[in-house]
Image (cartoon, rainbow, N blue to C red):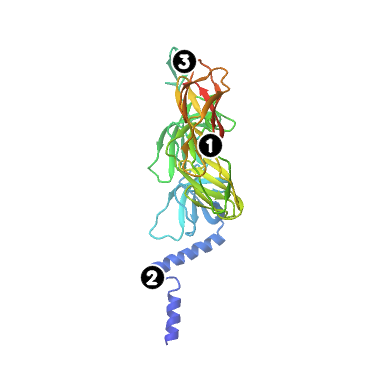
Amino acid sequence: MTYFKDVYKKRGSWWGATSKEQYQNAAIKYFEDYLLNSPNADTVIIDNIETAAAIHTNKEDESKISKYFLIGLDTSIGIGDLIYWSDTYWVVTQREKRSFEAYTKVLAFKCNFNLKWVDEYGVINESPCYLFGTMQSSVQDNFKISNGIMSPSANEFLEVILPYKVIREKQRFIIRDRAWKILGRDLISVDGLLYMYLQEDLRDAFDDNTTLSLADYDTVGNSYIDLGITALNLAIGASFKFNPVLYKDNKVVEAATFTYSSLGAGHYFTLTSNQLTGLALGSSTLIVSSIEQPDLQATCTINVLLSAPATDVLQLVGDDTLKWGRTRTYTSFYHTGGTPSEIAATFTLLNNTDNLVSFVSQDTTSCSIIANTSGLSGKITLRATTAHGTIDKEIAVVSVW
């Protein structure tokens, strides 16, 4: 009897030990069969992975711009995620909650625009989004009088829903050849989503790029990471510490933080924070990224050799732009893989034929220069000559506006 009793128990608990487990596991199995046979089933892509899903019409949506997606529990999906289906992206705005789940049911809106913007680090960002608005003009308050000149005022608005991104206040966009700026943002009502309310803005013929749909295109690339070197020869067993400098909007960022990683399959060196140690013969690439903006990166080729001489690293640290009448200080640093220290240098100005700048002071390791108020803009080169070589820094002299 023991054998038959064991078989009975095994078959009886096939779907689970409790009634709830049996009901839920049976429902999961029925959903898996449904995905195999239903005409509503199709393949979608979530986080670059293909998965099966059932797509249902949202009967409450007369405009047919939203769908319900039914997805197996083995696929993680939440509000703010993107689903790629029917040659377009869909942004998840709701997730249905039930007492027990045999599948995940989410509501997603069809993305009708690819939003692009240049962030405060000069990096181009983009994201599929759902864009909507009345686009209606009002007759009243259409124009305002400013300094005796009739000038148009913003009279059209757009609303945008997209996966949550860090976007600064007063960010500008180019949408279908027209300029827009953020009037308001909702950062907290729906976790995982960003809602923005945009107001029409004047387009800047010089700084906006309508071809690329990017506002403030002139700021692209205005931030970067200075490693001091682009290639490093490192002996097996030897170590080297990187000391990056972050320039944001052409100004030095104090106490900036970074992450370090390697590109390539070979394990030729080990990484401990910012310190590299040679491990095996070969070459790879070190990637240094800003924590605040991971897409802002600098690279250095690492060649691990049997033996290598010490690497001299010279850096001339100071802002890349100088406004009329302003003074900035520039300091020379030197290291060979340890902590940077200031180094004695002689400073000279190159390409300063229009007298764009003048020296205010010089000491052993630093100098201060001032941009003259002649009304001229341009670029000059500051050169630091040290016992370990020379280093140049290009500085742009710009208007105060």
Q: Position of residue 388 (x, y in %)?
A: 55, 36
**In the rendering, which numbered label is found on residue 150?**
3
Q: Nearer the viewer, mark 3 or mark 1?
A: 1
Q: Secondary structure at mark 2?
A: loop
User: Of label 2 and label 3, which has the lower sequence position?
Assistant: 2
- Up the image or down, 381 lies above or below 267; here it is above
Q: Amino acid at mark 1?
A: Leu
Q: Nearer the viewer, residue 310 or 113?
A: 310
Residue under the point 45% across and 73% down: 14
Q: Nearer the viewer, residue 368 or 82?
A: 368
Q: Position of residue 141 (x, y in %)?
A: 42, 21
Q: Which residue is mark 2?
A: 18
Residue under the point 46% across and 13% down: 149
Q: Nearer the viewer, mark 1 or mark 2?
A: 1
- Up the image or down, 90 lies above or below 385; here it is below
Q: Which residue is mark 1?
A: 314
Q: Residues within 10 Å of mark 1 (few under 14, many from 20)?
A: many
Q: Position of residue 327 (x, y in %)?
A: 45, 23
**Residue 256 visible within the image:** yes
Q: Position of residue 345 (x, y in %)?
A: 51, 30
Q: Amino acid at mark 3?
A: Met
